[in-house]
Image (tube, grey):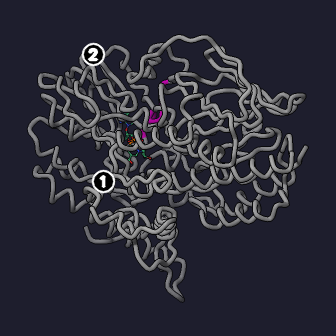
Amino acid sequence: MAFDPQVVHAKYRAERDKRLVAGRTAIRDLNHDEYVAGYRVDPFTAYTAREGITDDPDVVIVGGGIAGLLAGAHLRKAGVRRIRIVDQAGGIGGTWYWNRYPGVMCDVESYQYLPMLEELDYIPSRRYAYGEEIRLHLQAVADRFDLGSDALFHTGVTQAIWDEDAGRWTVHTDRGDVLSCRYYILAAGILNLMKLPAIPGMDEFAGPAFHTARWDYDFTGGSPGQALTNLGDRVVALIGTGASGLQCLPPLAEAAKHVYVFQRTPSAIGVRGNRPTDDSFAEGLQPGWQKARMDNFQSIMLGRPVDEDLTDDGWTRHYAAVQNPPRHKGMSTEEFMRAAEELDFGIMEQHRQRIDELVHKPDVAAALKPYYRYLCKRPCFHDEYFDAFNRDNVTLIDCPAGIERITEQGPVVGGQQYEVDGIVYATGFEAEVTPLPRRIGHNVIGRGGISLAGKWADGAATLFGMTSHGFPNMFVMPAPGQQSVVTVNYTQLAEFGAEFVAGLVAVLEERGVRVFDINPAAEADWIQQIVDTYVDPSAVLSACTPSRLNNEGDPGGIRARDTNFGRGFGDFFAYRELLQGWLASGDLEGLDLT
Ligand code: N01
């Protein structure tokens, strides 16, 4: 395809329209729907009954993933003694506890994504680490800072209430625990709510069906990183072709009698280029190397000049280029927009050509090609996915409008029944646009009985994206769409958020502050800044294929308050500088102190 804007627009529009169908966004309620409740059960750690406890730690952290662990680690460094992590999982790791599907890997470079490499004196074994290595590393972080021994696993918080007289939070759990703490930290992450589509008839399916975040190794055989040994005579349906689906296809294809891959929208899948860490990697690394590497990556993502691209992968080559198209002097807005679109088109063409090179059957290759602008969906990277479609035991079922229904035998598309023995739902998570109160799944009741859900009903209300008036001594770890910033390498944001929280707690303790709250005027100013810098992306995003990034085709539904500091994905460096300066000044401006 040559770049003819009219032709390209028409093609992209037609592809989008095939997917903008009624019922597209319908999902099952995993918390209240009895049938699907089973999808939440932890297949990795046995649940053991225990008595509820009563305790008064200094800090309760909800979530034992990267953000919660880093908050705990930095608080420990700041001298906080009693910390209790509470998590629904059976162990440490958050996303990396739950996502143990075959092939799971992080597509952010491991040297930046695995936190605290210098403190733990650890160098990841590969450029992009597999899930098990990440999970074990997070366990090592927990061990180093003794965050696991007091943690309450397989435990969900049911309510947290601010106790004005005590100047503490009272946290209740579904195990009957009652914890009274000075500081309450919400670190739920953004991938904690599995998305299970509401497909008619799915409850009738006779075989095992599970989400990638609860992989059923009893059905498939094997274990993370090992071959799947039970599938030789079994036919499997894989629903979903985002980052999770495409990673688990090659091991499934290797092991199963047959795999039907149900694709609603093709992902743009760039080169992965994974490889073992070079023996020479660690040589000459100077103290502070990991932070410097994260900053180098982040600079490129924000279009800032760097001497060298230390990462040099699809994120820095494609994503950063599309994010920051060149604007030459004297260019009109129209010229700029057109050049940006042409650049985008060129990158998408490279992705489409790659499919022609790797997939032997032309009709399958054609169906695997993504037709939308690069940032309409989260880009993916993989080197074995396309080759799986050259196998006789893998069939692509292209279903832009989704799966019609599921019967006792399996999925139905275009009136055709696909008989399968098991179904894998690689259907993702309620990500960025899910409001925090829903994400945390429990009531947080602040001063005067106000609920966080009530206060945030019209959008996030924070100072710095991490604190909220009326919720004293409480922190929310920074996350997308919450008035902080977005970073492709989430670890960088989590690490900074953890440093900030621990830094502030240290100052408060030093000054003998019992309770801090956010001054309403300071909060209103922060919200106003977010709203004032918000640029409504509807015009660009409405041309996109529906995805979670454009609110499933309804970008107008994104609220200005639920966005980021510094417009778009936000400006990490300006944010960090501002907050570091605020903390360093010692004025604690915007805080009301008791
Ligand atoms: O989920 P997704 P994911 N019928 O939402 C399809 C992180 N992550 O778990 O594209 C048929 O991307 C849906 O179709 P469509 C990362 O942040 C990272 O893969 O919406 N299909 C899509 O194909 C990532 O973005 C890594 O049309 C249905 C798929 O299910 C995030 O997690 C690895 C359907 C969901 O894709 C989520 O990724 C894994 C239906 N009714 C995850 N409903 C790495 O770093 C949904 N789909 C490598």
State the predominant SS element of the stretch in magenta: loop
Question: Can you name the residue that lies furthest to the bottom here?
Answer: 330
Rendered image: mark on residue 126: 1
Image coordinates for residue 515, horizontal then vertical, percent:
85, 41
Q: Quadrant of residue 170?
A: top right
538 w.r.t. 168: above or below: below
Picture residue at 64% right of the left edge, 24% below the top? 157
- Residue 213, percent from left and from top: 40, 32
| Separation (CA) of disc 1 from disc 2 | 36 Å
Judged left or right of residue 518, residue 258 is: left
Residue 170 magenta-drawn?
Answer: no
Q: Residue at horizontal 38%, vertical 48%?
A: 106
Q: Residue at x 23, y 25 (%)?
A: 220
Residue displayed at 42% across by 32% down: 98
Which residue is identified by label 2? Answer: 207
Callout 2 environment at 10 Å: few (<14), some (14 to 19), or many (20+)? few
User: In this rendering, is residue 44 above or below 527?
Assistant: above
Mark 1 vs mark 2: in front: 1
Magenta-drawn segment? 21-28
Q: Nearer the viewer, residue 552 or 112?
A: 112
Closer to the camera, 100 or 122?
A: 122
